[in-house]
Image (cartoon, rainbow, N blue to C red):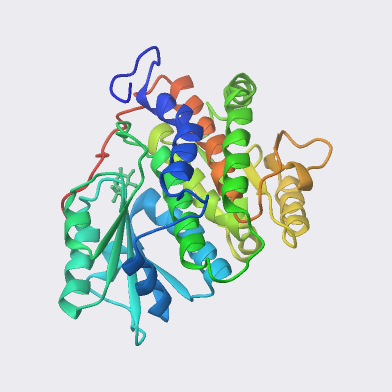
Amino acid sequence: SDLGKGAYPYYMIKEIDEQPAVLRRLIQTYQDQNGQFVVDDNLKAALQNSDRLYIVACGTSYHAGWVGKNLFEKQINIPTEIHLASEFAYNPPLMSEKPFFIFLSQSGETADSRQALVLVNQLGHPSLTITNVKGSTLSREATYTLLLHAGPEIAVASTKAYTAQITVMAILAAAVGQTQQHGLDLAHELSIAATNMETILAEKDQIKAWVDENLLETPNAFYIGRFLDYYVSMEAALKLKEISYIQTEAFASGELKHGTIALIEEGTPVIAIISQAKVDKHTRGNLEEVKARGAKTCVIATQDFAQPGDQFVLPKTHALLTPLVIAVMVQLIAYYTSLGKGLDVDKPRNLAKSVTVE
Ligand code: G6P
């Protein structure tokens, strides 16, 4: 059942495991009888009428927003901005003529996000909340709601909500863009992603073994990547620091040379994510640079960009959707690090599942 851990030692690992099923549930839930993705007609029209989308979120939801920005821009050609909710409310961005706001919030209760929505409502702009909780505050106060259908997420570190948010944004873009032809069979590509998640979930032992050998003793670590691989790196780093207390940062790998590389010491773990054409070779180059300075490197690559010696090769996934699959991998890295250090995986110190103060 959705409640209770069953045979699992922690909710987090149960929730990581649930992701392929959540993805498949979303494909079914948002498809009509003809296999087309559909959303409410008014929501569809509101997006089609908009000249700019503004995604507003915090934490893991904010990281999902970056992936969503790329989906909206590539699939429906609407410029999309992404904002931290805590920055937005007191210093709102310059807005376009016909803005449309998308609030991403697992809980639908985050005070920072709500504060931004209050402002958007005062200004009279249309909005959508994408949330896991039906009837939540952000859902009630926004013009439209789409649900994540992920089932309750109990572990403080968010996992299935992230992949569900990305999936729902992909579906929304598909539903809005239906009149145009994009050559992307989203239902098909999403079901491949679900299968690929299962492949990774079947290799937990290998991931745990790597973690046990490389991460349990380190005070710090880095994730690097470019473009979507950078966006998912941000989430990877957040996951690891939240539950393992290892100081982990994500860097757009091209920025390393502009400062960050000074932090690399003998044995510093640097994990590179490589799943995107055009930037894969550049990230490899950056990896060589940190290796030359003593870093202990690890590559997570999708099949089409893998090279001999890569530690983890993930199955081929549509280029727009690789974060769905890579997320599972990096969630497992964080999980096994926390577990290996004997920490309380589900209830990390100083953190709350839902933050209802600004
Ligand atoms: C808290 C949680 C994070 C979460 C963030 C946003 O800080 O610990 O895991 O990503 O809130 O939550 P929301 O419910 O708005 O997605």
Determine the residue located farthest toward the right in the rendered image.
Answer: 308
Residue 237 in view (yes/no): no
Is 231 placed left or right of 45 in the picture? right
Question: Is residue 80 depicted above or below 304 in this figure?
Answer: below
The foreground one among 29 and 71 is 29
Is 38 placed left or right of 143 in the picture? right
- At x 75%, y 41%, the residue is 303
Q: Quadrant location of the N terminus?
A: top left
Determine the residue located farthest toward the top in the rendered image.
Answer: 7
Q: Quadrant of residue 26?
A: top left
Q: Quadrant location of the C terminus?
A: bottom left
Residue 16 in view (yes/no): yes
Label total for image: 0
Determine the residue located farthest toward the bottom in the rendered image.
Answer: 97
Residue 149 % position (x, y): 35, 41
Is 181 placed left or right of 332 in the picture? right
The foreground one among 83 and 165 is 165
Residue 196 % position (x, y): 63, 35
Question: Is residue 257 depicted above or below 263 in this figure?
Answer: below
- At x 43%, y 59%, the residue is 65
Residue 211 % position (x, y): 58, 26
Residue 85 % position (x, y): 29, 63
Question: Is residue 197 depicted above or below 166 in this figure?
Answer: above
